[in-house]
Image (tube, helix red, strand yellow):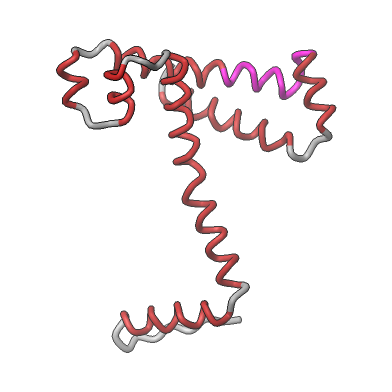
Amino acid sequence: MDVHRFIHAFEAVWGVVNKRFNQPCFLWKLQRLLGVGSERRLKEEIGDVHEFAMRIVKQRKGRKPEEIRSSSDFLSHCVLNGNSSDEFLRDIIINFVFAARETTPTVMTWFFWLVSTRPEVEERIVDEINSVRGGMEIRMES
């Protein structure tokens, strides 16, 4: 499976999970039980996500020990430790991808919302930007 297929599967999983929030709980649980609709698709796409992440685990474990020791990433550290199952390592990879996907947009959304509710903070931010820009003032329109 290539990276593009993984990205597509990951986005599809994300979409189905988000859709659950707009449905009555019993509906998606029934679909999952019967293996139909978006829940069937979710199961298929999760399989693709798992397959891609597991391939990364197998590739890392297939390296020579000295190569793994010379790597400074978290996955290599876990592989060297030797106490983690392949499924655990797979889930670590998926969690890192998930965390990286949503961190920045979520933080920026909250930042702008919080600033918009606190005019004194907005004013201080504008003042600081103006002081750094050396006389090239910016104005915030309400």
Image point (42%, 84%), residue name: 127
Q: Relative to 103, is 23 on the left or the right?
A: right
Q: Main secondary structure of the magenta part?
A: helix
User: Which residues are drawn in magenta?
Assistant: 34-46
The quadrant where residue 39 appears? top right
Across and down, in percent, residue 139 comes to 48, 84
Quadrant in the picture for the N terminus: top left
Across and down, in percent, residue 78 comes to 33, 23
Closer to the camera in the image, 86 or 101? 86
Across and down, in percent, residue 32 comes to 75, 19
Image point (52%, 78%), residue name: 122
Quadrant in the picture for the C terminus: bottom right
Q: Relative to 134, is 140 on the left or the right?
A: right
Image point (71%, 36%), residue name: 19
Q: Relative to 83, is 101 on the left or the right?
A: right
Q: On screen, 76 above or below 34? A: below
